[in-house]
């Protein structure tokens, strides 16, 4: 910090180069988007574009396209994996392990090229990009099954390799890439878009070197990184020093009944430094929900909540890895957020969207007037594989990213159909979707009454219904969450409504699905999904009557909800002002003297935590960590089965845990885990 403080702040040169670098990465991103072949790339914008320093830091990425929250992507390990670079090389990988967490699941295929100054044999910098491939092999079409139990079930794994060597395509490697996917032509079209974009970036950076000189560009790279760091530190210095704790859950009950998975954070602010300590988070799981961060400081999967907070406080902040230099991370190896090698990670975006909720929950305790209530917390991606009736050709495509609403906040209502952390997703026009795969979209609209009530209403979720127009179809939906634990309200605001999924068969039956892992559907079947609504902020009785009337007129809130949650009475289709004033006065009188809790967690989570208290969960994790990583999730599930009844949740296992309601102290948990291990050992070796 002392050395940084002595360097010149900003300056004309840094500002000029900042804009020049932004121009290069925007052109890189636009080329990928315009030349891409799949709806993942050209419609939902599931790609990334970066200029990267020799040390592996992002010194510029577009702030208006692609997955633009990933400025903390760690590129150094991938750079070092290639022994020698020559002009015209293009490297490729989709492997989380050998890229050191640059890749976070197999469908993200990264490519990069070195950029040299004339006469130098050491790269001045690198251009990187990735696209989310529609399919990379694995258990299911689209490659992402939330129920996968290891990475080998998730598809083809390619360590860092040269796809183009000194301008010459490696045709053998290209053939391997095409052979390990259900959609070879579509994937190769996206890969060619990456190759073209990287070549263009190499030329554009060459033009900047010719104009300003290599030394100036090198100084500019460090300058824009340092400038972003100074800006971020100035924001952190405005947060009161202290440690702020919060936790939230992944429900993880799509494959079989499982206890919810806790993500627990202790966020510490000291001056301009910030530490995200996830030591109390649950162990890794044999599900595709793990985040392969390798515990790296400022990792892009752990900091989006902070990145968005920084941008809300300083909209013109320089958009690069310097923003997250002040952020240290503690994530023990073997935990959900830093799993052992080859753990399943395909559906990791469900976890990625929950981490910002946890960070903002902690941050809201430090700066309560700057942080909104919880958003829908879901970034589900629905995908279909179905044969065309006339040709039998299998079509594989995304159907729609299904996002919840954002939370209401101190300055206004939440955004409908968009959550803050998932704002980079773009929806697919129905006409494009229906021409791409044999389906009919019957409904795609905002969900009525899904947002949590508050002075500022939570954003509405989505309602999406799709009919299958094929002899059969396989549907997957990675990242469905918040069907049990609702998005939490703040400062008197109420939770958002949970999500749902319902299958209406052509035969007339109706089945509530909860979450979807892999779903086989028949011709004429209709799948209906409702995404979670954002939570409310502030007392609903403080919402203006005019705002409630407008919500009713727009169909966002029905008249029953207006009365029950907001105290606004309608009679004969018109607002009853006298009745409203009387009802609100009675309700306010009942609130006098009652403290207002900072969070409304919803009844399901409140009930769960009244039984499995944070202290009991901490004690269970401490006991689990005495055993190998591969056993922890199994032992955790077994411990919950034995202890649920004893803590007052579910049915007790009387043979091991005692009768329902027997008091359980944190010190009692460890011996139960030890007894489970002894039982397993006895069964194995008797």
Image (spheres, rainbow, N blue to C red):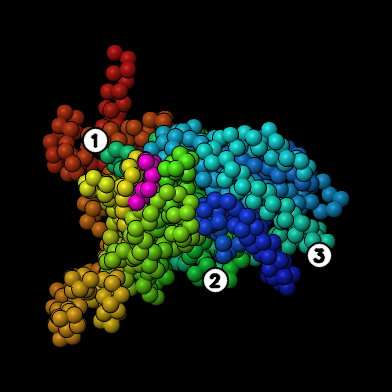
Report which quarter residue 279 is drawn in. top left
Q: Measuring from the top left, give residue 564's x and y in whole percent.
A: 18, 70
Horizontal arrangement in the rendering, residue 215 relative to residue 308 (left or right): right
- Residue 28, which numbered label? none
Q: Look at 52% across and 58% down and name the residue there.
A: 43
Residue underneath mark 2: 315
Q: Measuring from the top left, give residue 14's x and y in whole percent.
A: 71, 68
Q: Secondary structure at mark 1?
A: helix
Question: Disc 2, disc 1: CB below 8 Å?
Answer: no
Whole-number angstrom distance, CA of label 2 to CA of label 3: 28 Å
Decide which of tag 2 and tag 1 comes sooner along the chain: 2
The magenta stretch is 467-480
Horizontal arrangement in the rendering, residue 572 relative to residue 438 (left or right): left
Query: Front-most of 579 and 247?
Result: 579
Q: Quadrant of the N terminus?
A: bottom right
Q: Measuring from the top left, give residue 673's x and y in whole percent.
A: 29, 32
Residue underneath mark 1: 641
Question: Disc 2, disc 3: CB below 8 Å?
Answer: no
Residue underneath mark 3: 212
Q: Measuring from the top left, give residue 123's x and y in whole percent.
A: 76, 49
Horizontal arrangement in the rendering, residue 226 relative to residue 534 (left or right): right
């Amino acid at each position: 910090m002392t050395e940084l403080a002595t360097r010149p702040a900003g300056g004309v040169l840094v500002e000029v180069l900042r804009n020049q670098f932004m121009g290069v990465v925007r052109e890189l991103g636009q080329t990928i988007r315009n030349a891409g072949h799949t709806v993942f790339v050209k419609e939902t914008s599931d790609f990334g574009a970066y200029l990267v320093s020799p040390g592996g830091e992002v010194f510029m990425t577009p702030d208006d396209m692609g997955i633009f929250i990933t400025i903390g992507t760690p590129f150094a390990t991938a750079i070092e994996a290639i022994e020698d670079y020559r002009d015209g090389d293009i490297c490729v990988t989709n492997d989380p392990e050998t890229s050191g967490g640059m890749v976070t699941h197999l469908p993200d295929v990264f490519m990069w090229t070195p950029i040299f100054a004339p006469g130098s044999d050491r790269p001045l910098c690198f251009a990187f990009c990735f696209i989310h491939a529609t399919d990379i092999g694995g258990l299911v079409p689209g490659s992402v099954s939330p129920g996968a139990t290891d990475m080998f079930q998730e598809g083809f794994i390619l360590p860092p390799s040269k796809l183009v060597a000194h301008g010459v395509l490696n045709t053998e490697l290209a053939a391997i890439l095409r052979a390990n996917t259900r959609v070879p032509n579509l994937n190769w079209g996206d890969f060619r878009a990456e190759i073209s974009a990287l070549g263009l970036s190499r030329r554009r950076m060459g033009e900047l070197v010719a104009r300003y000189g290599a030394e100036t560009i090198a100084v500019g790279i460090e300058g824009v990184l340092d400038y972003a760091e100074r800006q971020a530190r100035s924001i952190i210095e405005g947060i009161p020093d202290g440690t702020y704790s919060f936790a939230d859950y992944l429900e993880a009950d799509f494959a079989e009944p499982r206890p919810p998975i806790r993500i627990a954070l202790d966020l510490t602010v000291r001056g301009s430094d910030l530490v995200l300590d996830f030591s109390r988070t649950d162990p890794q799981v044999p599900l595709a929900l793990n985040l392969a961060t390798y515990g790296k400081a400022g990792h892009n999967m752990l900091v989006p909540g902070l990145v968005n907070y920084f941008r809300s406080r300083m909209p013109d902040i320089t958009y690069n890895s310097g923003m997250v230099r002040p952020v240290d991370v503690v994530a023990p190896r073997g935990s959900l957020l830093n799993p052992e090698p080859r753990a399943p990670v395909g559906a990791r975006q469900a976890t990625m969207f929950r981490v910002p909720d946890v960070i903002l929950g902690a941050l809201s305790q430090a700066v309560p007037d700057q942080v909104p209530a919880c958003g829908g917390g879901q970034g589900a991606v629905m995908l279909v594989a179905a044969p065309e009736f006339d040709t039998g050709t299998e079509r594989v495509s995304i159907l729609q990213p299904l996002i919840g609403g954002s939370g209401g906040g101190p300055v206004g209502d939440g955004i409908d159909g968009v959550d803050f952390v998932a704002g980079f997703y773009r929806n697919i026009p129905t006409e494009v979707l229906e021409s791409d795969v044999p389906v009919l979209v019957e409904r795609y609209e905002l969900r009525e009454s899904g947002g949590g009530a508050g002075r500022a209403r939570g954003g509405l979720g989505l309602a999406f219904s799709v009919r299958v127009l094929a002899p059969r179809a396989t549907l997957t939906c990675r990242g469905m969450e918040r069907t049990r634990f609702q998005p939490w309200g703040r400062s008197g605001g109420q939770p958002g409504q949970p999500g749902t999924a319902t299958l209406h068969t052509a035969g007339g039956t109706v089945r509530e699905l909860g979450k979807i892992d892999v779903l086989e559907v028949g011709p004429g079947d209709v799948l209906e999904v409702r995404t979670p609504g954002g939570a409310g902020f502030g007392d609903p009785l403080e919402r203006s009557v005019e705002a409630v009337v407008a919500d009713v007129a727009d169909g966002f809130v029905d008249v029953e909800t207006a009365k029950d949650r907001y105290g606004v009475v309608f009679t004969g289709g018109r607002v009853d002002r006298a009745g409203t004033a009387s009802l609100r006065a009675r309700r306010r009188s009942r609130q006098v003297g009652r403290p207002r809790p900072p969070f409304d967690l919803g009844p399901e989570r409140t009930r769960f935590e009244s039984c499995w208290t944070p202290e009991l969960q901490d004690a269970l994790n401490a006991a689990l960590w005495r055993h190998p990583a591969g056993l922890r999730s199994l032992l955790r599930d077994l411990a919950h089965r034995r202890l649920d009844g004893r803590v007052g949740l579910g049915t007790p296992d009387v043979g091991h845990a005692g009768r329902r309601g027997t008091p359980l102290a944190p010190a009692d948990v460890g011996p139960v885990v030890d007894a489970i291990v002894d039982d397993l050992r006895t069964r194995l070796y008797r």
